[in-house]
Amino acid sequence: MTLAERSDVAAQIRGELASITRLAHVNTFHPNAFDWAEATAPAELPFLSEMAFGERGHERQAMAYITKELAQLAEIERHVSAVMTLVLGELQDRPDEINTGHELHHALSCFAAEEIQHANTFYRYVRSLSNVEPRVDAGLFGERLAVFQTDDHPYVKLIALCCSAYVGESVITVFEHRTDALDPMRNRFLTRLLHTHGLDEARHVKIDHVAMKLLYPALDSRQRDRVRTLVSAIEELNRRLAGAFQQATAETLGVDFVTGNPAAVVQLEMTRRFGAQLFAPDGSLRDVDEMVDDELHRLLADFSGQTWVHRGPRAVLALGAAGGAA
């Protein structure tokens, strides 16, 4: 890449980040904005059962499933915030054409601040919903942070972090689509929670895309290899974290919430596909909508009423009672 080309890319990145964060103060949320008494309203548990199992009658299993998933997600978002702050600190004395002006620092600062509030919010919801908070060996936090405490360039760490976060952000976005399809008026607390969380996540996904599509190609081959290594390492630890949270939640609440749970099956399949196909055969990074083939279209449509994840709708389908296309 020539110096002129690098300058053009740097200017494009700064411009994209400025555009993404322009309304971050408006399209956001704070946990104090919720009426937390509504989280345990009588209609909430039947809705959780419909969301997870496609029908009522599985309220306790659905409550345990949501408890596990959102407590685990809270830990992942807390880690993202910490690593984003680490990257900001390491960028402080590395001025370049991207890391100049306010755009990069502002975007990453917003990202980090919003992620820690997401962790705060999800843990509060879990406590309200189930009266427990699963505890998992300090959330493997030290091990997950150590993955990024290396001598790699901060941009290598930033891209790897965005890649690992992107998979989970994409999966929770599909669940947001599902709750919106089942509850289009957003009468249920969970629907509103995921919708308002999605206001921030939509920006985070766009920042991920900037890192994946503009910043990653500017790395040299060794740095790109290191991105893959870091992504692989953090994803393995995230899988361990998921297993630990599943065990802790099942033991604490005394319920099997995985067997016969179609939402858990869809979630695992999406996580597997999005992670496995993130790197294209040519080594470039793909966004999830570039991965969606006919089979995944059907999976998304049956579960969420949409055949897309982050892009504009290709089709909007009505959901049947069990989550299938009507």
Image: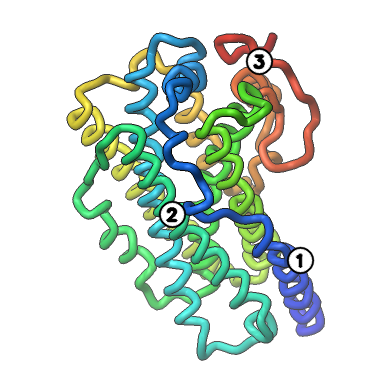
Distance Cα–Cα, label 3 vs label 1: 35 Å
User: Which quarter of the picture shows residue 11?
Assistant: bottom right
Residue marked by disc 1: 19
- Of label 3 and label 1, which has the lower sequence position? 1
User: Mark 2 is on which residue type?
Assistant: Glu
Residue at left offset 61%, top offset 56%: 28
- Of label 2 and label 1, which has the lower sequence position? 1
User: Mark 3 is on which residue type?
Assistant: Leu
Residue 212 in the image: x percent, y percent? 63, 59
Mark 2 element type: helix
Residue marked by disc 2: 77
Residue at left offset 36%, top offset 26%: 63
Of residues 22 and 77, the one drawn nearer to the viewer in this rendering: 22
> Local crowd at mark 3 within 10 Å, few (<14), some, or many (≥20)?
many
Residue at left offset 68%, top offset 23%: 305
Instruction: Tell me: residue 43, above or below residue 173.
Output: above
Mark 3 element type: loop
Of residues 21 and 92, the one drawn nearer to the viewer in this rendering: 21
Residue at left offset 69%, top offset 9%: 326
Distance Cα–Cα, label 2 vs label 1: 23 Å
Residue marked by disc 3: 319
Mark 1 element type: helix
Distance Cα–Cα, label 3 vs label 2: 30 Å
